[in-house]
Image (cartoon, rainbow, N blue to C red):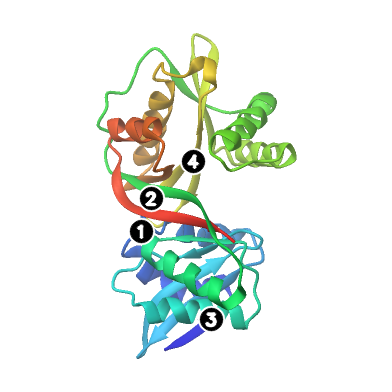
Amino acid sequence: MKVTFAASVNEYLNIVEELLLKKEACNNLMLGLLDRLLTHKAECHLGYVEKEGNIVYAFMQTPPNNWILADVENVDQDTIEAVAKSIYQKNLEVPGVLGPIAKTGRFVELWQELTNKKAVIHMNQLIYQLDEVQSELRNGGKLIHAARKHFPLIADWLYQFGQEANELIAQTRAEQMATRFIDNRSIYLWQIDGQLVSMANRSRKTKNGATINAVFTPDKFKKKGYATSTVAHLSQKILDEGFQFCSLYTDSTNPTSNSIYKKIGYYEAGSSIVYKL
């Protein structure tokens, strides 16, 4: 068994893309980040495991973010242990790790033994996939592209979204994200009777799919179906653009969001767990 770190994103994609595409929706985070890194250069650590001449596993990090472990079938514990030991021997920082529950749990066990650091579960997640919008698209409102004039609203909503999602976003970062989303024309708002009531962002894309994130509705507009309408219409727009599916992450303990997505036609494609170290 051999663990290697690729020298470039192009090289890494050539090596691991076929493996990751076998569970494309579940690996949307890795695939989406790699797609972004092709055009937006940033520091990254891109690792893969080779056994008997075959690529059997992949893992990566974009510092200072968490390490990501791929969702791959039939991976034994020895492979995950080799990943952990390789990162440790290279003295790379591990602020946290996320990935499939069993594989990530084994990585964390070994990491705690190697470093004497304590790991805590930050979030249990579900990964959803949608191939066809099954709910009737709601009339009486419309999905609009966010514009520059919406910057203060989006920055504020992103800040509130972070608080709700237990992923605290500093005000400065919320403003940076709002600027990027607006410039990329990826952020959408649901407008009804001239009022903006909900938002969602079209995030990463993979070979056949695109991911939705930052779904948020302020408290005063909740329980009126606005988030459902926003996600349903944005999902249909993504499919109309030629993508075969949409995907998104949810907090598995949040019954409201999980119920919303299932009504639209999303189904569980996999699960993930996030540890902080």
At label 4, counting other C-alpha atoms closer than 10 Å, the crowd grade (few under 14, some 14-19, many 20 or more) is: some
Q: Circle 3 is placed at which residue position? A: 85
Give the mark nearest the N terminus, 1 or 2. Answer: 1
Please state which of residues 87 and 50 is positioned toward the viewer in this rendering. 87
Q: Regarding mark 2 in the picture, which secondary structure is present there?
A: strand
Q: CA distance from mark 1 to mark 4?
A: 17 Å
Residue 206 x %, y %:
43, 55
Q: Circle 1 is placed at which residue position? A: 24
Residue 192 x %, y %:
48, 13
Q: Regarding mark 3 in the picture, which secondary structure is present there?
A: helix
Above or below — where is 167 with respect to 2?
above
Q: What residue type is disc 4 on?
A: Asn
- Residue 213 numbered tag: 4
Please state if 197 lies on the left or on the right of 170 as rendered.
left
Q: What residue type is disc 1 on?
A: Glu
Give the mark nearest the N terminus, 1 or 4. Answer: 1
Determine if residue 29 is in view.
yes
- Residue 209 numbered tag: 2
Farthest right residue in view: 172
Q: CA distance from mark 3 to mark 2?
A: 33 Å
Q: What residue type is disc 3 on?
A: Lys
Q: CA distance from mark 4 to mark 2?
A: 13 Å
